[in-house]
Amino acid sequence: MPVLVQGICHRLLILSRASLATPMPGYNRRLISPPFESTPPMYTLARQLLFKLSPETSHDLSLDLIGAGGRLGLNGLLCKAPAKMPVSVMGLDFPNPVGLAAGLDKNGAAIDGFAQLGFGFVEIGTITPRPQPGNPKPRIFRLPEAEAIINRMGFNNLGVDHLLARVAAAKYKGVLGINIGKNFDTPVERAVDDYLICLDKVYAHASYVTVNVSSPNTPGLRSLQFGDSLKQLLADLATRRAELALRHGKHVPLAIKIAPDMTDEETAQVAQALIETGMDAVIATNTTLSRVGVEGMEYGDEAGGLSGAPVRDKSNHTVKVLAAELAGRLPIIAVGGITEGKHAAEKIAAGASLVQLYSGFIYKGPALIRESVDAIAALR
């Protein structure tokens, strides 16, 4: 490890142990927006140190620090806790409707840490049956002028068994979603096998399970969103879930995460398939393949899924189409482009019951959680 990196890691470890700062995920100087004025000085210092590392290294280190803060019970000191705003969705009780989206904590490394920041629920993953390295590095790119991220991670994770060990070690007793997918080398026609393996293993430990069929970074995965492939996958999941419910004596909701790149007709067809197969929720949306809003920017042409502010309008449109088609028959969890509290409120107004943060959280920090809860509360 280079001397500079060793020094930075040592200084961050001292900060963590001294309980002076527990930073949110940050990357490098070119890949993140300026800090809030209310950011604690030690938090700012830690982030400045993190900026000296490569994007993925700093992300991993940030997760370590958030996890350490969670184990010490200190992350709640980073910002004022959001107001209580209980809501019941999918038969589950949430202290507030703002959650952490899957992708930031793929392996469940910092469950307690994220929960202490004020999220109403935490979703971890995407996890696969077997560990896999994901796509070659570099695979994360930040576009700060657009408050956007492009990633082509490729479901890099340590496998479902490792994730379950982390869940068992966590103290968090709130709503925990576990997001499942298929291994990259599993043929698409056998994808259901991987989803069923994961569902079997996580069922007893999850508040709800999300089925990810919409990542653009696993070849062929998005084909599972359409037609007979989707209906067969959902039917197999529903059958297995019924068996698991009898075995474990509880019903665990299933949510399906979809892409923002479908036509309105395709989105409506997905909605009907979800209703027909008895799914419990839909998460809209994953990242987009579109590059609208980042044209000509550095890294704007990198392959992968685009998230952050540029996906906001596409995500909101998908939520509206789903809301019209579902007509309240199952809830929508909205994610994509929330960089201010008002954007979270927009999604609720469009028909969502819950929202999730990802890129906006990275750019704006934990204060965005409270801001989002407050904006949603103002709709009432």
Image (cartoon, helix red, strand yellow):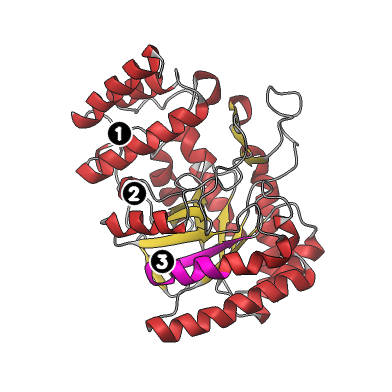
Where does residue 291 sit, x and y in percent of width and height? Answer: 75, 36
Q: Nearer the viewer, mark 3 or mark 2?
A: 3
Q: What kind of residue is marked 2?
A: Gly
Q: Name the residue under label 3.
A: 206
Q: Residues within 10 Å of mark 2 (few under 14, many from 20)?
A: many
Q: How many labels does the image show?
A: 3
Q: In which quarter of the image is residue 323?
A: bottom right
Q: Considering only vertical position in the picture, is 254 above or below 183?
A: below
Q: What kind of residue is marked 1?
A: Thr
Span shown in magenta = 196-212
Mark 1 touching mark 2, by CB under 8 A?
no
Q: Between disc 3 and disc 2, whose residue precedes?
A: 2
Q: Is mark 3 on a helix, strand or loop?
A: loop
Q: How far apart are the two marked residues, 3 and 2, measured between alpha carbons?
A: 19 Å
Residue 367 in magenta stretch? no
Q: State the residue at coordinates (49%, 73%).
A: 253
The reply to whether residue 19 is visible in this rendering is: no
Q: Considering only vertical position in the picture, is 135 above or below 315?
A: above
Where does residue 3 sit, x and y in percent of width and height? Answer: 37, 12
Give me the disc on residue 81: none
Q: Name the residue under label 2.
A: 118
Q: What kind of residue is marked 3?
A: Ala
Q: Considering only vertical position in the picture, is 204 above or below 41?
A: below
Q: In this view, does 97 lie to the left or right of 268?
A: left
Q: Between disc 1 and disc 2, whose residue precedes?
A: 1
Q: Is residue 333 left or right of residue 187?
A: left
Q: Mark 1 points at which residue?
A: 22
Q: What element carries label 1?
A: loop
Q: State the residue at coordinates (68%, 22%).
A: 298
Q: How crowded is mark 1: few (under 14 residues within 10 Å), some or many (20 or more)?
A: many
